[in-house]
Every structure is written in structure tokens, then in C-alpha cells.
Image (cartoon, rainbow, N blue to C red):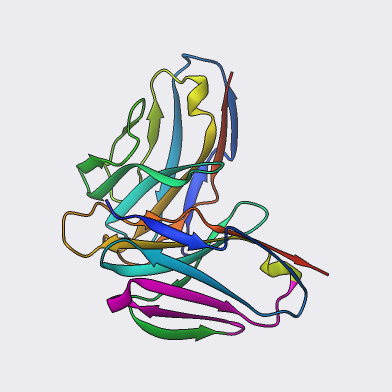
Amino acid sequence: EAQVTQNPRYLITVTGKKLTVTCSQNMNHEYMSWYRQDPGLGLRQIYYSMNVEVTDKGDVPEGYKVSRKEKRNFPLILESPSPNQTSLYFCASSLKIGSPLHFGNGTRLTVT
Amino acid sequence: GIQVEQSPPDLILQEGANSTLRCNFSDSVNNLQWFHQNPWGQLINLFYIPSGTKQNGRLSATTVATERYSLLYISSSQTTDSGVYFCAGMYSGGGADGLTFGKGTHLIIQP
């Protein structure tokens, strides 16, 4: 089944403890992206990747890192999480930028 | 970047009713898409509709790119249609890094 898989679905952590949210797609998509969703603010792009080893900042990149070593994987790394990064995170992929976008099921992160 | 305005922000309807959701863009866009976020938080791509009209069951969408808007029609609403509907587009003038999303229309269908 064609899908975007995110893990974990729920994560509670403490300030400053490094964490990684994994994202994998099995559709051979070139474009992958991370979004955060907050009440009243909609979906905001954190980072995106046009292809392997090509990543760039979105609208709200501060406090996040990404890597794209393989085409299928696009992990989101929070080196030192803070409470303002408490949010619902989505990974998404599409064949190319602008093509129909497919989302993972989301990761709800709470930083205390 | 472009601004995406969705209306109405909230909508409460009885089961069986029809509705129209609107999406306006501040500049010319392409790759326009509509998404449904169900009550469990999943985001599903409903339509990829850069122009023209498409239909999928009780849902249809129309994009008038020259006038910078798109409409999503839901007919004979069911409770499972509840959730948040997002539209998104990409600035067609070049340099865009992906889709820009509106803030969504929160739809509640009451039985």
C-alpha cells in the first residue's frame, strides 16, 4: 500500500532532550516536507527536500534539523526541544514539488 | 508569499444539507489542492485541481485560476464529512518552496 509512515504517533518529552521523528514513504517521491499544525495558525512548513541530499528551510525552521540521505526517508530532528515546539507534526511527500501531496498520520509532540 | 483565505471559518449543518467552501488566493497560483482533516487528525488529499472542475462522489471542486479562487462543493452531507477542509496552492511566479495552506474551514455535520 502506498503510504507515508511517521513514528511515533505520540511523544511526550522534556525540555532539552534530543528527539527524532521518523518519516518514510514507499512511493519513490522526490519531494518531501515537514509541517507543524497549531490552533488558529493552520499548517506551516518547517523544512522541505526536493531530492536526496537537497534540503531547504520552510517558513518556521528555527529549532529543527532534517536530513535526506535516502530518497524514502526524511527524519525531523529536534536537538534541544522547547515547550513552544509542542505541536502536531506532519510529514508529506509528492512525486515532485506541486504534485498531489500525501500526508503521514501525524505525530503529536508535547514538550514539558 | 501568497495569502490564502478560506471561508467560512466554521460551518454547522444538518445531515443531508449541501455546502460550498471557498478559497481565495492573493496572487496567481497553480497546483491547487483540497484536503480533508478528519476528527482523528488524518489529512486526506481530496482533489488536485489547478483549473476546471472535478467530481468524486458527493464532492466536487472548481478552480477559476484567472480569478484566483476555488470552490469545494459537498452535497447530501453525512456525519463522516465532519472535520476541517484545507485548500493549498503554490505561487505560479516561480521560486515557491511548496504549497501554502489556508487556515481551513471547520465543518460539523449534525445527525
Vertical arrangement, residue B23 with respect to residue A15, above or below: below
B64 left or right of A88?
left
Residue B53 point in image, percent of width and height? 42, 85
* Residue A1 visible at all: no
A23 falls in the magenta region: no
- Kindly give the residue lying farthest to the left in the view shown: B94
* Image point (49%, 50%), residue name: A5
Where is the C terminus of chain B found, in terms of image quarters?
bottom right
Magenta residues (range): B57-78
Vertical arrangement, residue A1 with respect to residue A85, above or below: below
B73 falls in the magenta region: yes
* Image point (16%, 54%), residue name: B95
* Residue B12 visible at all: yes
Instruction: Determine the image quadrant of residue B56.
Output: bottom right
Residue A98 point in image, percent of width and height? 29, 63
* Image point (49%, 70%), residue name: B22
